[in-house]
Image (cartoon, helix red, strand yellow):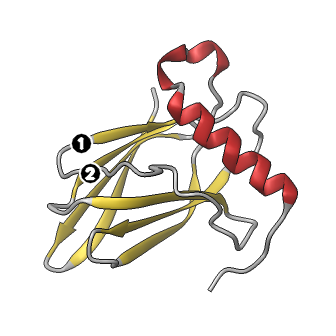
Amino acid sequence: MFTKSSKALKVLAFSVVAAVSLAGAGRALAGDQDFTVHNDTGVTIKELYVSPHSTDDWEENLLGKDSLKDGEEQEITFPKREKTENWDLKIVDSDGNSVEWANLKLTEITDVTLTIKNGKTYATTKNGD
C-alpha cells in the first residue's frame, strides 16, 4: 500500500480540495489538469483520490464527507500553477471496494466516465477540443 508522505504533496492535495470547493469560481484560475468525473457505475462512490503518478501517497479524499451517487458528476479542478501532467485516480465505493487507474494524462483529458460492465470497472476518458 502507499506510505510516502511529503509536505509539498499535502499542500497540493489541500489545493485540489480547495479548488473542488470553488469549482464555480471560473476557468481563469483553473489548471490544465481540470476534469469532470462522471459516476455511471450503479454504485455510490464514497471516496475519490487523485495523486501525481510520480508519488505513492493518495493524500486526502476529494469528496470529503460527501459521496458521488450513480448518475452524478464532480468537477475536479487544480491550481493554475500545477504543472504535473500524469495522475492516478482511485475510487472507493460504499462497500469499501476500491479501483485504481494509473498514469492518466490530465492535461489532455476533460472527462472521465466510470462504468461497471460484467463485474469490471472501466474509466473512459474524453479529450478536450
- For the residue labelled by badge 1, is the local secondary structure a helix, a strand or a loop? loop
Residue 18 in which image quadrant: top right
Q: Residue at x 78, y 56 (%)?
A: 9
- Position of residue 64 relative to residue 28, above or below, is below
In screen coordinates, is 102 left or right of 6?
left
| Numbered tag placed on residue 4 in the rendering | none
Residue type, numbered disc 1: Glu
Tally of marks: 2
| Numbered tag placed on residue 72 in the rendering | 1
Are there few (<14), some (14-19), or many (20+) residues within 10 Å of tag 2? many
Q: Is residue 107 visible?
A: no
Residue 79: x percent and y percent? 70, 31
Residue 78 in which image quadrant: top right
Task: Tell whether label 1 touches label 2 (CB within 8 Å).
Answer: yes
In screen coordinates, is 115 left or right of 90?
left
In screen coordinates, is 99 left or right of 60?
left
Q: Residue at x 69, y 39 (%)?
A: 15
Q: Which residue is mark 2?
A: 39
In screen coordinates, is 65 left or right of 69?
right
Residue type, numbered disc 2: Asn
User: Which residue is more in the foreground, 26 or 108?
Assistant: 26
- For the residue labelled by badge 2, is the local secondary structure a helix, a strand or a loop? strand
